[in-house]
Image (spheres, rainbow, N blue to C red):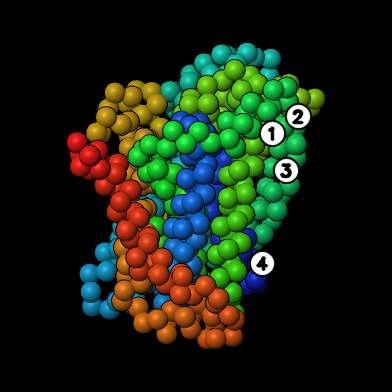
Amino acid sequence: MTQDNRATFGSKIGVILASVGSAVGLGNIWRFPYETGQNGGAAFLLVYCLCVLLLGLPLMLTEFFIGRYSRKNTAGAFQVIAPGTKWNLLGYNGVIAAFLILGFYSVVAGWTLEYIYQSLSGALSGKTAEQFTQDFNLFNSGIFRPILWTFAFIALTHFIITSGVKSGIERSSKIMMPILFLILVILCIRSVTLPDASVGLKFLFHPDFGKITSSVVLSSMGQAFFSLSVGMGCLITYASYFGKNTNLQKTALSVTLLDTLVAILAGVIIFPAVFSFGIKPSAGPELVFITLPNVFQHLPLGGLWSFVFYVLLAIAALTSTISLHEVATAYILEEHHFTRKRAAFIVSAGVMFLGIISSLSFGVLKDFTIFGLTFFNFLDYVTAKIMLPFGGMLTCILVGWRVDRKILKAELTNKGTIPFYFFNIYAFILKYIAPVAIVLIFLNELGLFKWIEK
Ligand code: TRP
């Protein structure tokens, strides 16, 4: 495809919504609460916000720069930024990460479909907290049912991807994202009016600094990258579809703020409920799925609430899987000159394969572990805590050290037509702060500092 006939997003609001759609997903509503629950609550939230501001936001802006400047898929983009070098390997890191993330993300997305079904069939009511937990475990340790839902979700993603950028990605985001916000706010109001809601709010907002350990810091950073969709070129691919007049700074800021807002709203929905119904906040990946049915059944018209919520979760997941799928599809399409349909088919088939193993790792493959982690947890760990921060670090180094400041500034200010007041701070973060911080967080987790202290 030549540069000129590349698709672009049709409208300003479409650009923002599609990017928000990529960022806001299971990462905010499923992963954020369970990571917060496992990593000590408010302390985690605090470090998370720091990571979003200091690492996530500058990196997002940088990915927007790379994408719109090069107008290429993730792998091709690096060849434009640093031609004739090995930096394009970074693009492959992104394409592989897209497959691996989809490999576990689609499974959880499949769970949301099961819960939509159960809300409709009435199976999500009249149970105790223990029964909800038991039934969830029975479901996700099964063989056919969760795999079937995983496949259904991948098929849904595939369908939107093959309808193309403008009619598929943009239109679906435009309809789905505003509905999502509305429903979240309504659920928040319900949750904070539960009995003992204050205990949950305290857990989320009142930090105990003693709980900030090296693994809390690594987890917060991983969560920040995961939630903002940065570190693997997802936003490079989207930005390659942005128009010349898109304000990259404003878009990055809006996406970051909205994404963080949704995560915090999700926390405000989940934690009051967790404490109100005596569920452990550290329950893990099942947290959202065992907590919320309890809330819904204690509400008037509970079945309706729960139906609406899981539809919302599925929608949020879909706008994210679309963005991940698009990274791999655009790569195969443009670098190997396949048709869009064939490229998408290859991606979907690969993801289905990974999805089967991830799904089974809650049941029959429970004992098949890699470095002590089940296949599902392994994919999650490797992508969020290693590949994304690593990819993000190299992206900052590449743009901070190799790209001409004038080119960078021209692209981020639309050739000087919009101001960029913090440009020097931004460039300093790219060049020094982000790479050093990420390396230190890695080393800290590996126990290097403990070793030095001895
Ligand atoms: N950010 C999305 C979420 O929070 C998931 C996601 C979409 C993602 N694209 C990504 C994560 C790219 C990392 C990289 O659910």
* Badge 1 element: helix
Which of discs 2 and 1 lies nearer the camera? The answer is 2
Determine which residue is flagged by label 2.
193
Q: How many residues crowd mark 1 within 10 Å: few (<14), some (14–19), many (20+)? A: many
Task: Name the side, left or right, on which 346 lies relative to 369.
Answer: right
Q: How far apart are marks 1 and 4 (CA)?
A: 28 Å
Q: What residue type is labelled 3?
A: Val
Which of discs 2 and 4 lies nearer the camera? The answer is 2
Q: Where is residue 291 in the image (x, y as percent from the top left)?
A: 60, 25
Q: How far apart are marks 2 and 4 (CA)?
A: 34 Å
Residue 306 is at least partly visible in this image: yes
Q: Distance between the residues labelled 2 and 3?
A: 13 Å
Q: How many marks?
A: 4
Q: What residue type is labelled 4?
A: Ile
Q: How many residues crowd mark 2 within 10 Å: few (<14), some (14–19), many (20+)? A: few
For image coordinates 37% across by 53% down, the residue present is: 388
Determine which residue is flagged by label 3.
185
- Marked residue nearer the N-terminal end (1 or 4): 4
Q: Residue furthest right?
A: 300
Q: Distance between the residues labelled 4 and 3?
A: 21 Å
Q: Compare residues 285 and 125 and report the one nearer the observer.
A: 285
Q: How far apart are marks 2 and 1 (CA)?
A: 20 Å
Q: Does the residue labelled 1 lie within 8 Å of ligand 1?
A: no
Q: Residue furthest front?
A: 453
Determine which residue is flagged by label 1.
307
Q: How far apart are marks 1 and 3 (CA)?
A: 16 Å
* Badge 4 element: helix
Residue 395 is at least partly visible in this image: no
Q: Where is residue 127 in the image (x, y as percent from the top left)?
A: 64, 14
Q: Residue 13 carries which label?
A: 4
